């Protein structure tokens, strides 16, 4: 996801009130039948694995309408006659065609259920085509809302793009709209009025003038892609390009901007994108989509991590619209949207959470990637300072992990808090080469896969050789910070954790003031602090790298 939540910059002035009993992972929230249809991997969805789409859509910009079709090629995962795909109810399903004949279907909210004339058997490969039309939801404040953005450029020419992360791709095209199933490859055909261009994901295969005054642009995506990344960018675009010699050879870098932006873009894009690729290939491994190339596309909204076609609307400014998220100054040395959204190519696009409740996998790692970009260019201390500055945006208002099966994200803290936690985990591991190997290993082990919370956390834990499960649980599944309490117990200066997570025993760096930091590993019971000369008056915790509450009795 792009940085959709411009988190409030609230300074943490004291300890977050701590709940003595383990709080519920989520506040009770009412979810509808439609939420479950959208978020749950029900039997009519789980019955098929999507292999290929051909999305073929015409944009009638004057009437803010679209019409077209989507071909579904799939493999049956078990026997079925009933199948679900998704399309928002304000768009019409004109017909569903199977083997040349229409199939019966019925709607339930934004879900469409299709009945096949005979059983589709497990392991068989089959296909059907959905024809649809209508006026899709207009996104008035993308990327904070979803749908189609209708704007004009400075020369009054149409500038129309899609952005649908969170709300779902079925807001503008029919698909199996669940994060757990990424299509293996895809052809995207977008027809636009003559004189305009479409820029979508992957590589441009063909441009075809049509008899009705439209032009069709065919883009092919050779790699798996999640639904919300699929994009149409329509405008009076011009193109320039570059190449980067990376870990897997020559990577094409294509840039599509408005003519009035061309000269600014030529300087700005390369100055950010090339060092980004250098830093992220170092930390995360090869760019995951060499076959589809790397693109930046100027858009009328701020930005979005559309795979191999990153949306860019930061006005060629450093920072986030000229603002430093960390308040340290380091965030003004690079373009936030280029770095952050490109980081999603590794976390979000290469590795994708199976459920929207685990959007932290996308956002926490990508927010953390910003400090690694700084470290690669200005040193580790600069990256740590930036990461520390992000704390001002943490609210600790609700858990980072959202409820599952209802298409609901967790707290916006997934950005800064997630980044801070990953830096803390790195500090606990205390081996930067091992940490780099873990980050690269994640992208290699789960290359082009959808994953769960347990898969990611277990991998880091196993590779680190440390029990990090309670650490991730405390910071991601609960909203409260753990409190490190110091007290004199039976004549000895001791420490314990007050925490929600079971068996919480996180190592932490402490020292007597002026001395060297040393790891201690308190549990939820008081144990003596094994550091010479330390007492309640001189105890210091490494607050730069550890995000904890401290209580000294």
Image (cartoon, rainbow, N blue to C red):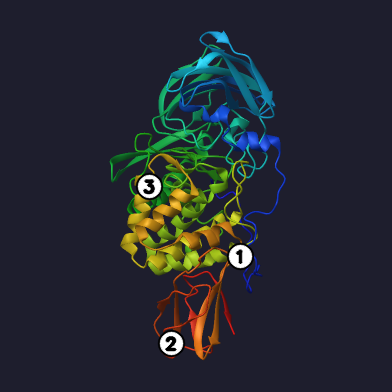
| Nearest the eye: 153 or 485 | 485
Say which element carries label 2: loop
- Whether residue 34 appears in this view of the structure is yes
Badge 3 element: helix
Quadrant (top left, top right, bottom left, bottom right) of the C terminus: bottom right
Q: Residue furthest top?
A: 100
| Label 1 vs label 2, nearer the camera | 1
Residue 220, picture quadrant? top left
Q: Residues within 10 Å of mark 3 (few under 14, many from 20)?
A: many
Q: Nearer the viewer, residue 416 or 485?
A: 485
Q: What label sits on residue 443 in the rendered view?
A: 3
Looking at the image, tell me whether mark 2 or mark 3 is earlier in sequence order: 3
Hey, which quadrant is residue 445 in on the image?
top left
Q: Distance from label 1 to label 3 (Cα)?
A: 30 Å
Closest to the camera, between mark 1 and mark 3, is 1
Q: State the image coordinates of residue 210 (x, y, percent, origin top left).
A: 51, 14
Q: Earlier in the sequence, mark 1 or mark 2?
A: 1
353 relative to 528, above or below: above
| Picture disc at residue 514 | 2
Q: Is residue 332 visible?
A: no
The answer to the question of whether label 1 and label 2 lie on touching residues, with beta carbons closer than 8 A, is no
Q: For this rendering, which residue is in front, 256 or 120?
A: 120
Q: Give the residue at mark 1.
A: 480
Q: Who's the residue at 55% across and 29% down the image?
A: 45
- State the residue at coordinates (64%, 28%): 111
**CA neighbours of label 1 inside 10 A, class few (<14), some (14 to 19), many (20+):** many
Residue positioned 62% across, 70% down in the render: 12
């Amino acid at each position: 996801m792009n940085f959709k939540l411009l988190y409030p910059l609230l300074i943490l002035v004291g300890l977050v009130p701590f709940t003595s009993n383990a709080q519920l992972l989520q506040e009770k929230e009412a979810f509808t039948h439609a939420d479950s249809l959208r978020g749950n991997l029900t039997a009519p969805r789980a019955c098929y694995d999507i292999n290929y789409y051909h999305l073929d859509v015409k944009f009638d910009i004057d009437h803010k309408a679209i019409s077209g079709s989507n071909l579904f090629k799939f493999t049956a995962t078990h026997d079925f006659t009933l199948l679900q795909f998704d399309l928002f109810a304000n768009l019409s399903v004109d017909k569903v065609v199977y083997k040349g004949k229409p199939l019966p279907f019925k709607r339930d909210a934004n879900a469409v259920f299709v009945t096949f004339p005979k059983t589709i058997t497990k392991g068989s490969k089959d296909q059907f085509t959905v024809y649809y039309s209508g006026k899709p939801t207009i996104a008035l404040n993308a990327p904070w809302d979803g749908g189609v953005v209708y704007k004009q450029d400075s020369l009054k020419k149409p500038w129309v793009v899609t952005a649908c992360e969170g709300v779902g791709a079925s807001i503008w095209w029919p698909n199996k709209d669940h994060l757990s199933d990424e299509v293996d490859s895809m052809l995207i055909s977008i027809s636009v009025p003559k004189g305009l261009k479409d820029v979508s994901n992957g590589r441009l295969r063909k441009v075809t003038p049509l008899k009705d005054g439209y032009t069709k642009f065919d883009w092919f995506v050779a790699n798996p892609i999640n639904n919300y990344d699929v994009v149409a960018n329509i405008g009076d675009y011009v193109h320039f390009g570059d190449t980067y010699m990376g870990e897997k050879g020559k990577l094409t870098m294509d840039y599509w901007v408005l003519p009035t932006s061309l000269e600014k873009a030529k300087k700005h894009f390369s100055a950010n994108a090339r060092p980004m690729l250098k830093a992220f290939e170092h930390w995360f491994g090869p760019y995951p989509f060499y076959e589809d190339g790397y693109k930046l596309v100027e858009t009328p909204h701020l930005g979005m991590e559309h795979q191999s076609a990153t949306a860019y609307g930061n006005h060629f400014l450093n920072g986030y619209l000229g603002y430093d998220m960390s308040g340290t100054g380091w965030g003004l040395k690079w373009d936030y949207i280029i770095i952050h959204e490109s980081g999603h190519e590794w976390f979000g696009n290469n590795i994708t959470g199976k459920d929207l409740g685990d959007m932290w996998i996308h956002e926490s790692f990508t927010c953390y990637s910003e400090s690694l970009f700084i470290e690669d260019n200005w040193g580790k201390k600069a990256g740590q300072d930036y990461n520390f500055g992000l704390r001002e945006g943490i609210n600790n208002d609700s858990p980072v992990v959202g409820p599952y099966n209802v298409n609901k994200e967790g707290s916006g803290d997934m950005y800064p808090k997630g980044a801070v936690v990953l830096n803390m985990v790195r500090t606990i591991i205390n081996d930067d080469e091992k940490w780099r190997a873990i980050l690269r290993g994640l992208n290699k082990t789960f290359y082009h896969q959808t994953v769960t919370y347990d898969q990611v956390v277990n991998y880091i834990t196993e590779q680190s050789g440390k029990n990090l499960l309670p650490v991730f649980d405390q910071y991601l599944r609960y909203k409260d910070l753990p409190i490190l309490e110091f007290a004199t117990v039976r004549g000895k200066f001791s420490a314990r954790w007050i925490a929600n997570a079971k068996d919480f025993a996180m190592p932490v760096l402490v020292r007597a003031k002026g001395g060297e930091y040393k790891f201690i590993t308190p549990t939820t019971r008081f144990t003596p602090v094994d550091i010479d000369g330390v007492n309640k008056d001189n105890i210091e915790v490494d607050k730069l790298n550890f995000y904890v509450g401290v209580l000294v009795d």
